[in-house]
């Protein structure tokens, strides 16, 4: 019983410390609030079930964001996601907004973040992990399961695309 209580307390601490980061990353991948909510819940269920599997070779934040990315990819592949995406014309105006949603909305107010959210997924991820989650290039490589060179290349191309988008918005 004591171990179970310890795991519950640890999970509570992780959710308080990293819940916003997990939700924001899930949202940046899916661009859907309800899916970000589902993915965040799934991530912390997986964490609770697999706390014993955490290896100390990565930071807790890197571990959580890796789980988040994998859960988002799983959701994206599922038939449920395809069905939700196709029926996206129905909007729920009466939904209650979470704190995480409000934070993302404040970020989206900034034109640069709006442009980041328009980037293709592979570029959007590196920018968000670097600028918003403040991960190192090595940590980003771990989360994305790619080399640091790939991260650097994606970061370079993302910045190029953002510069072009910024110039286009000024001239447009």
Image (tube, rainbow, N blue to C red):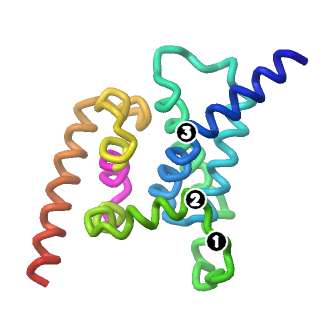
Magenta stretch holds residue 125: yes
Q: 14 above or below 52?
A: below
122 displayed left or right of 31:
left
Name the residue beneath numbered marker 2.
99
Q: 2 above or below 149?
A: above
Q: Main secondary structure of the magenta part?
A: helix
Check residue 84 in the rendering and tell me which mark sits there, or answer none: 1
The residue drawn where x is 42% and y is 65% is 106
Q: Quadrant of the N terminus?
A: top right
Determine whether the residue tagged by mark 2 lies in a helix, strand or loop.
Answer: helix
- Label 1: how many Cα within 10 Å (few below 14, some 14–19, many 20+): few
27 displayed left or right of 127:
right
Q: 159 above or below 168?
A: above
Check residue 158 in the rendering and tell me which mark sits there, or answer none: none
Name the residue beneath numbered marker 3.
18
Magenta stretch holds residue 27: no
The residue drawn where x is 28% and y is 66% is 115
């Amino acid at each position: 019983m004591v171990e179970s209580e310890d795991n519950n307390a640890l999970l509570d601490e992780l959710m308080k410390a990293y819940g916003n980061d997990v939700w924001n990353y899930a949202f940046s991948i899916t661009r859907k609030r309800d899916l970000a909510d589902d993915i965040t819940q799934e991530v912390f269920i997986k964490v609770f079930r697999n706390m014993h599997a955490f290896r100390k070779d990565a930071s807790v934040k890197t571990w959580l964001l890796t789980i988040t990315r994998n859960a988002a990819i799983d959701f994206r592949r599922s038939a449920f996601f395809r069905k939700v995406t196709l029926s996206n014309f129905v909007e729920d105006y009466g939904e209650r907004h979470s704190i995480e949603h409000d934070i993302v909305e404040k970020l989206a107010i900034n034109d640069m973040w709006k442009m980041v959210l328009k980037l293709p997924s592979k570029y959007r991820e590196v920018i968000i992990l670097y600028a918003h989650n403040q991960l190192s290039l090595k940590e980003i490589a771990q989360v994305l399961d790619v080399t640091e060179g790939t991260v650097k290349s994606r970061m370079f191309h993302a910045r190029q695309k953002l510069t072009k988008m910024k110039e286009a918005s000024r001239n447009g």
